[in-house]
Image (cartoon, rainbow, N blue to C red):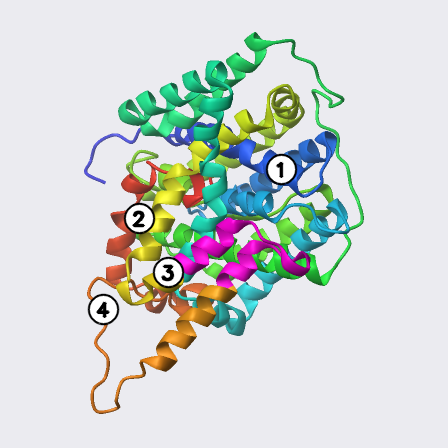
Amino acid sequence: MDGRRSPGTVQPVLAGVVTAIVGFASSFAVVLAGLRAVGASQDQAASGLLVLCVTMGITAIGLGLRYRMPVSIAWSTPGAALLVSAGRHGGGYREALGAFLVTGLLIVLAGFSGLLGRWLAAIPVPLASGMLAGVLLPLCLAPVQAVVRFPAQAVPVVVTWVVLNRLSRRWAVPAALAVSIASMTLSGPWTAHGSRFWPVLTVQAPAFSVGAFIGIAVPLFIVTMASQNVPGMSVLAGYGYRPRLRPILASTGTATMIGAPFGAHAVNLAAITAALVAGPDAHPDRARRWIASVTAGACYLGLGLSAGLAVSLIASSPPLLVEAVAGLALLGALGSAVQAAVADPGQRDAAIITLVVTASGIAPFGIGAAFWGLLAGLAFRALHRTASVPSPSHPAEPAPGSSAEPSAAALTDVPAESAAGPSAAERAESRPADMDAGAPGHGGA
């Protein structure tokens, strides 16, 4: 501190409120679209959104009070986009719930097992980013399609997003969402379409299948870890916080498992909104910023009660218009994913193959395209490396500008000093301002 009077608790409380509102409004449409795509009814989708908010809120409050650090919790926005591309499996919604439960178990195991973390770290960054880009691309095309099919409703939404993206990027998606809601209510009669304004918990026994495990659970785990938990830890490190990863993964994985029968697909660290509560805007004193993350958790508990109203609004509009708002929210995440996918010239072709196959939407044997995209990219990469193995006397030089592979230390519970060196912290510190321009969670809140 520099001797100036501390602003007390007002500043971090306001930062927490803004974080929750931005995180919820920017991507709840993506969550609802994903749940509906895997077979949820309107009431089941509202239940999933409610339970996500409750489990996120409780987890954020618990971790913030326990460690006195601004540990921001969110749902997996890229994971919800993955559900849109995965679609409904043979066993319907119950198989999706089983996949959510397995995803939570894998997250818990990643916290306690260094082996699982090393497996994840073995996936090259360009290929993981290519898979994420392929998942996001179909949704990001929706705004363009909506402008052509529903110009009266979609054009004001897109124009609002463009203008606010220039003036105040943080509020671009919430403002576009507000305009879309106004368009929904003014363009025709608004009815509840069988859903309730207040959400009602719906619970079903999860079902399990190989197709849902490979097509939903495994890609959802990879996307959530690579696009939410790892960037979230990097943002915290950039601001000087180094919480232990094991209890965080154990908490978020357990929350996911508890919420799965109710429709909650994945709870994880926030990436974009992590910067809102961990940065100096939350409080000049680093020791007081945990108040912001705890406040955000409390706000999520209240926002969960609006899940039924959100579903009612969504049900009153053309599905493509809803996807258009979701696509606008994910454009920043798509740009970041594409940039990371093509950054290393030596792996660019494999990353593009991963992207294209994933974006194709194919589902042979009932297994989603994300798995086939990653498999195709890894196979091409292995074949290419086998065909160009360098001579032992002439080791290959790393490609200029190539991105570093993720460290297994970042995915396992090791001392913070060895898990994140100064260079990693410097890189993370430069990211929050840029990341705020994208979608929540780097695809997530």
2 or 3: mark nearer the eye: 3
Mark 1 secondary-structure assignment: helix
- Residues packed near mark 2 inside 10 Å, few (<14), some (14 to 19) or many (20 plus): some
2 or 4: mark nearer the eye: 4
- Would you name the residue on which mark 2 appears? 239
Task: Give the Cα distance between marks 1 and 3.
Answer: 34 Å
Residue type at numbered disc 3:
Pro
Residue 51, above or below 14: below
Residue type at numbered disc 2:
Tyr
Task: Give the Cα distance between marks 2 and 4.
Answer: 30 Å
Residue type at numbered disc 4:
Ala
Tell me which residue sits at (67%, 54%) in the image: 99
Mark 2 secondary-structure assignment: loop
Residue 272 is left or right of residue 264, and the answer is left
* Viewer-nearest residue: 102 or 285: 102
| Sequence-wise first label, 2 or 3 | 3
* Viewer-nearest residue: 237 or 401: 401
- Would you name the residue on which mark 3 appears? 126
Residue 37 is left or right of residue 91, and the answer is left
Q: Percent x, y for residue 104? A: 62, 55
Mark 4 secondary-structure assignment: loop
- Would you name the residue on which mark 4 appears? 399
Task: Give the Cα distance between marks 4 and 3.
Answer: 13 Å
1 or 3: mark nearer the eye: 3
Q: Residue furthest right?
A: 205
| Sequence-wise first label, 1 or 3 | 1
Read off the magenta span.
351-374
* Viewer-nearest residue: 246 or 154: 154
Residue type at numbered disc 1:
Val
- Residue 218 visible at all: yes
- Would you name the residue on which mark 1 appears? 54
Tell me which residue sits at (45%, 36%) in the image: 141
